[in-house]
Image (cartoon, grey):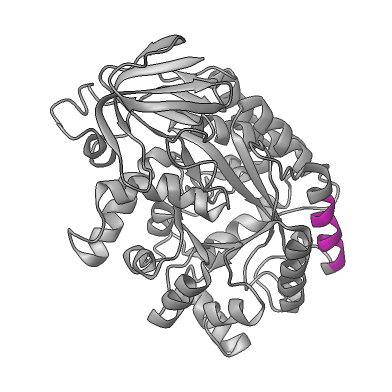
Amino acid sequence: MIVVEGCAVATVDGQGTEYASGHVAVDGDRIVAVGAGTYPGEGERVDGRGCLATPGLVNTHHHLYQWATRGLAQQENLFGWLTELYPVWARLDDEVVAATTAAGLGWLALSGCTTSTDHHYVYPAGAGDLMAAQVTAAGEIGLRFHPCRGSMDLGRSAGGLPPDEVVEETEAALVATEEAIDRYHDPSPGAMVRIAVAPCSPFSVTGKLMSESAALARRRGVRLHTHLAETVEEEEYCRETHGCTPAEYAERLGWLGDDVWLAHAVHLDPGAVARFGETGTGVAHCPSSNARLGAGIAPVPDLLAAGAPVGLGVDGSASQEGGQLGAELRMALYAARLRGGPTALTARQALSLATTGGARCLGRAGELGSLEVGKLADVALWRVDDLGHAGIDDPVAALVFGPPATVELLLVGGRRVVERGELRTADERELARRGVRAHERLRR
């Protein structure tokens, strides 16, 4: 039993309930009480004065292996960036993937993230068991993990963007994807690992793999994820190759629905926005990565108004070197206002993207994303009385508008993962050293 009290509480529930001074009590892996004042029952007390309690953040899009290739292709758009990095990624192996997964997830934990996806789609021949490396590393860090078994089967010789040495045969990719579901997907309540089916993108995957992946996912009852409508170059590619927009292509292949969430969705026309809302198709909004690559600004307020689930994503560490989900709250707010003015998105809407919105994208709104009795004890406690935040009376505004806040406590299923700004489940310096070794191996 752990009781956090004396803190401001933003529950991010359906009514937007908040307490200026309240408590959150957890027993085992579940929340058992949330309210104003002190908790009347027993339990180990955590002094939350000067802090804000929120649900743990949910990262809806990432490429953790890219931790080993940060800082490269600094002035490229997406296609140029991929063209430069694909040959480097062709040297990936299970040791590199284990190191980068641990480093990336450790860093995410320090930014308030309790649940993260990962979209791994590069499987070079002889690289070892990359999915096992990821799942093991995630277990060591202690985050809830939704790895997406990615795939590419459209190499350069067949008109795709990636070099042939990093793509798979269509049937081999489908078989490996189903094997990942068999080995790792846990559909039970409170699951720490769930698998999604995730062919990479319209310019690296055949229509056959896209449609058969959708059929596989629905047959097995798992979710679907891919990149879509990220850049103007992708739109041009789809129009030239398929005679339609990326969103129209996705719908043609069965890729709209309430079991689908799509990364980026920057270049959507009003009709596509409406279809996303009508079908319940989710979007992983990645504002820092979109800015880094100059891709544009996703129409997040329009998607929200249409009723589409929208979560936040850090995206790959090589296109978003900061790698902190907490910082994306501010970036999402600013990006929306650059596109639509100062009323386009509020601080509380930004927080909901990273919590309830992410939970909806992952199909876990009943378990994650808000501080409510019966939900999983995934809780972030942020310090908002330090020099960078002191004097901002509204604690949610302090978190979103202010600098990245220190995580005073991070609970994942009631387990302490971060305390007083330090990772408790792994040695941060060792994670950094392993990350450097992985970088050096790939660069050689």
Coordinates of residue 159 in the picture (x, y in percent)? 70, 79
Give me the residue at 62% from left, 86% from top.
241
Residue that appears at 65% across and 30% down: 437
Image spot of residue 257 (x, y percent): 58, 69
> Would residue 69 be counted in the magenta stretch?
no
Q: Position of residue 431 (x, y in %)?
A: 59, 25
Question: Which is nearer the eye, 321 or 407?
Answer: 407
Position in image of residue 261 (x %, y %): 56, 61
Please say if 295 is above or below 315: below
The question of residue 172 being in magenta is answered with yes
The reply, left or right, for residue 257 in relation to residue 269 is: right
332 or 187, which is in the foreground?
187
Q: Is residue 176 left or right of residue 52?
A: right
Q: Residue 315: tell me if it is visible.
A: no
Q: Quadrant of residue 286?
A: bottom left
Magenta residue span = 171-179
